[in-house]
């Protein structure tokens, strides 16, 4: 290497170091919030410390959500329409947002910053995350081909968050077939997933690589499938079956008048089974009617076969819930939240075991019969706790269930008589555990309150208590957010390590400057020696290739 090249290399080292510092600044000097509870609602996203003592950040709805004209009020609104939220655990938090054109929003998991608002198919709702593939799968409830939609399910890659992936058309034909639906992906399912549509009696098996349906499993008696959960313990799905029912008079399945007398259906279940072309309805309207007798399918994903069917304690269908580790499955009946049925999985291909019917007693009022009073379950498992906490939209208390014996204890959230949660179809009372702590959050969306429960360190469910109520804090759903990826050492840590190894006692700036000046001085010293030696005796430095001998051969001292 020539002297000029060596000088340039030293100088470029200094420049490169500064450029690298500037590039790394975003990653190493940005402020990380740390673990926190994120609340998603009409006013945007609120972020709090796990115990609720401090607000970390608020992303306002006016900064992150679309402005649209309300079709009923004829007023412009910018309320966020968050429905489901998931975390990928290391980069982003993902939220379906039905406000306006419908989006899937991405937020930085460390800083809470709003990263992207991704266009997707119409009315995005259900979301599931595939950790191995690092993909977010979104089920849209109202895809619109006139707006460019091509399917019921859209896909987003964590490493290319704005990439436009191929949508999955579950039905394979006209997108007018739509409605509520569920999508299930899981690392234990490999490169396959499953989807449903409320309007169709088919279960769809999806090839995640090809983004297409590769198998259609028809459930003959059902009119549609919705509310599906998965247990990795036995690799089984638990799917609520929906049916058609009659209406019109007191002897019909609904026991009352038809909302749409011109709607004709074929009934396959209940006391009116076999009737065709009769006034009636299908789907949600038939929940808890005498026709709602199929219950839930337990489905083996390994053999793609139905293992058995289940009903709730009232011998009708129910909404399923699966513990994240698959250790138990719970059925929420349309009985006002009075009872819950608990199943435990067995080996793959074997029917689960009915281990307990537990009376929760959320509501036994006649007017609440027909409603699924149980809203959500949060499972807390660590070295101290083995508990499930159950919420209801029909009561101001939660039920703590000891999962070792399924015993229960009730905890009042508030002393108010008026129910603090919205209720009815689509309403929910959200709950989330701040993992690694004793804190559990429960919302009260009717009054914009948040209740923070502290579990007792002994694990005794009877000693849990509400320690804090946050007011004027609306939310539709909530999620505890934590970055589980190993943290990279900061710039300060790296420099400190170098200083330690080199026994540098001065600060970084002076030390680095001295190092660069020293390197330059050495190079200049070498250059000076070379020049002196080359000028001695009038001999010039040989720059020709010559015969391959040392270019300084003529400068030897005799």
Image: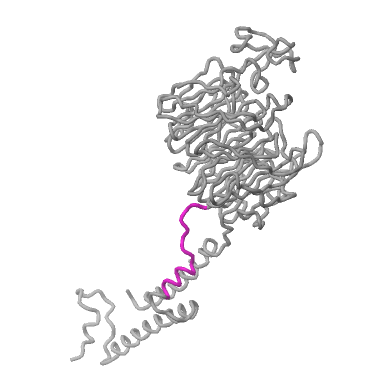
Q: Is residue 320 above or below residue 494?
A: above
Q: Does the magenta run of residues contain 484?
A: yes
Asked whether, in this view, residue 239 is left or right of residue 288, the answer is left
- What is the span of residues highlighted in magenta in the rendered image? 483-499
Of 390 and 323, the residue lying toward us: 390
Q: Residue at x 47, y 39 (%)?
A: 325
> Toward which corner of the image does residue 162 lie, by quadrant?
top right
Measured as percent of width and height from the top left, residue 130 is found at 48, 40
Is residue 521 visible in the rendered image? The answer is yes
33, above or below 142, in the image: below
Q: Is residue 420 left or right of residue 483?
A: right
Residue 126 falls inside the magenta stretch: no
Q: Nearer the viewer, residue 99 or 228?
A: 228
Position of the C terminus, as image quadrant, is bottom left
Q: Is residue 151 visible?
A: no
Residue 100: % across, % down? 70, 39
| Total tally of numbered discs in the picture | 0
Task: Kindly identify the residue that appears in the image at 28 percent across and 83 percent down.
Answer: 541
Residue at horizontal 47%, vertical 58%? 487
Scheme of image coloration:
one colour
Residue 221, position in %: x, y? 55, 15
Residue 199 position, x and y percent, is: 61, 22
Quadrant of the snapshot with the N terminus: bottom left
Q: Quadrant of residue 302?
A: top left
**53 lies above or below 280:** below
In depth, the one of 230 and 463 nearer the eye is 463
């Amino acid at each position: 290497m020539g002297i000029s090249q060596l000088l340039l290399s030293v100088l470029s080292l200094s420049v490169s170091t500064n450029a690298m510092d500037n590039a790394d600044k975003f990653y190493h000097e940005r402020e990380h919030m740390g673990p926190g509870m994120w609340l998603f609602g009409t006013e945007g996203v609120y972020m709090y410390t796990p115990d609720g003592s401090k607000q970390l950040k608020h992303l306002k709805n006016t900064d992150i959500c679309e402005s649209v004209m309300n079709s009923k009020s004829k007023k412009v609104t910018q309320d966020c329409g968050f429905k489901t939220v998931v975390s990928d655990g290391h980069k982003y938090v993902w939220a379906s947002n039905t406000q306006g054109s419908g989006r899937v929003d991405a937020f930085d998991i460390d800083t809470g910053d709003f990263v992207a608002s991704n266009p997707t198919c119409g009315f995005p709702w259900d979301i599931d995350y595939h950790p191995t593939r690092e993909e977010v799968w979104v089920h849209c409830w109202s895809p619109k081909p006139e707006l460019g939609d091509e399917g019921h399910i859209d896909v987003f890659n964590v490493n290319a968050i704005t990439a436009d992936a191929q949508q999955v058309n579950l039905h394979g034909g006209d997108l007018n077939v739509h409605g509520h639906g569920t999508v299930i992906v899981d690392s234990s399912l490999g490169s396959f997933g499953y989807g449903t549509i409320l309007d169709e009696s088919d279960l769809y098996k999806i090839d995640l690589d090809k983004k297409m349906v590769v198998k259609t499993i028809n459930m003959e008696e059902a009119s549609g499938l919705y509310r599906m959960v998965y247990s990795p313990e036995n690799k089984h799905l638990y799917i609520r079956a929906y049916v058609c029912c009659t209406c019109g008079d007191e002897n019909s399945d609904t026991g009352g008048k038809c909302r749409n007398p011109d709607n004709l259906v074929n009934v396959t279940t209940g006391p009116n089974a076999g009737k065709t072309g009769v006034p009636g309805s299908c789907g949600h309207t038939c929940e808890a009617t005498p026709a709602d007798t199929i219950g839930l399918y337990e489905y083996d994903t390994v053999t793609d076969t139905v293992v058995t069917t289940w009903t709730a304690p009232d011998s009708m269908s129910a909404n399923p819930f699966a513990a994240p580790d698959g250790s138990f499955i719970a059925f929420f009946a349309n009985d006002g939240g009075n009872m819950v049925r608990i199943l435990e999985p067995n080996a793959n291909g074997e029917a689960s075991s009915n281990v307990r019917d537990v009376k929760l007693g959320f509501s036994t009022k006649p007017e609440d019969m027909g409603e699924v009073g149980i809203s959500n379950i949060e499972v807390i498992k660590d070295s101290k706790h083995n508990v499930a906490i159950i919420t209801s939209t029909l009561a101001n208390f939660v039920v703590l269930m000891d999962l070792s014996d399924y015993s229960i204890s009730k905890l009042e959230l508030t002393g108010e008589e008026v129910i603090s949660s919205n209720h009815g179809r689509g309403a929910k009372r959200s709950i989330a555990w701040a993992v690694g702590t004793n804190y559990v959050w429960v919302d009260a969306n009717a009054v914009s309150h948040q209740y923070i429960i502290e579990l007792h360190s002994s694990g005794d469910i009877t000693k849990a208590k509400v320690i804090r109520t946050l007011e004027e804090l609306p939310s539709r759903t909530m999620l505890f957010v934590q970055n589980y990826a190993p943290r990279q050492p900061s710039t300060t840590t790296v420099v400190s390590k170098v200083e330690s190894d080199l026994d540098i006692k001065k600060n970084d700036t002076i030390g680095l400057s001295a190092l660069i000046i020293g390197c330059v001085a050495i190079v200049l010293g070498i250059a000076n020696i070379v020049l002196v030696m080359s000028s001695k005796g009038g001999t010039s430095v040989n720059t020709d290739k010559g015969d391959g001998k040392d270019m300084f051969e003529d400068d030897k001292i005799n």
